[in-house]
Image (cartoon, rainbow, N blue to C red):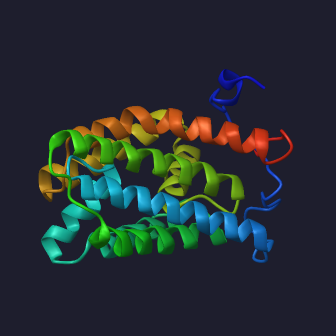
Amino acid sequence: MGLLEVLRPAKEVPTTIWSAEDPLTVKPRTKTLVILIIGLWVFGTGDAILIAAGIGNTPWTVLAEGIAINIDWSVGQTTFLVSVLVLLLWIPLKEKPGIGTILNAIIIAAAIEVMVPKLPTPGNHYLAIAQALLGIVLVGIGSGIYLTANLGPGPRDGWMTGLQRVSGIPIARVRGAIEITVLAIGWLVLGGTFGLGTIMFAVLIGPIVAICLNLAGRFGGPGEVHG
């Protein structure tokens, strides 16, 4: 197996030996649950590293940070708050959360809460860029891990797919509209951090997640997909 084949981006979420057969199961296998928790913690740690870099956050974290600034909470706490508010938006869309949906809201926020105070603030712009890049890579790896667990989408992804289902608008447009809106409110209205790190995330996260999914599919089991 050549390096280019291994690093080729996946087009769909692969089925692996740890993937749940039913995303809404209430009794997942232990290994599936462990993989999910690891993936979510890696995701949250990557997000925390990006926050600590100080040169721009992901769109949703720009919103969470903006809220934190205005109500004097930590970013971890407001990340959880945003997840809960987004889950409430599932109700009119009749979306059903899985175990992964609930744990997504809890564990990512917990990882941010725990890790941000422990992380260094870069001493110069080049170190900040390197730290932001590391954070983005970890977010991508974490995404690739938890998505293959197949235990339900995260609150934000489920809202996005629910809106797409009821509106019929292409998913790329729905995602773009949501993230631009969230970023604009978080940055322009609430004062969250937008910058080079945000742009780096927008450019790099898709390919990194796709490559991680390809690796999971090649080394984690059969080549079927969830669709």
Name the quadrant containing residue 125: top left
- Residue 213 place in picture, x, y as percent: 65, 41
Q: Is residue 218 left or right of residue 12?
A: right
Query: Which of 155 and 100 lies nearest the eye of the viewer?
Result: 100
Name the quadrant containing residue 63: bottom left
- Figure check: 85 above or below 139: below
- Residue 73 place in picture, x, y as percent: 22, 77
- Figure check: 27 above or below 167: below
Query: Which of 72 and 92 lies nearest the eye of the viewer?
Result: 72
The quadrant of the image that shows the C terminus is top right
- Figure check: 113 above or below 92: below
The quadrant of the image that shows the N terminus is top right
Which residue is drawn at the image coordinates 65% and 26% (left, top)? 8
- Residue 211 place in picture, x, y as percent: 60, 35
Which residue is drawn at the image coordinates 69% and 52% (left, top)? 148
Query: Which of 62 and 172 lies nearest the eye of the viewer?
Result: 62
Which residue is drawn at the image coordinates 16% and 77% (left, top)? 72
Query: Which of 109 and 171 lies nearest the eye of the viewer?
Result: 109
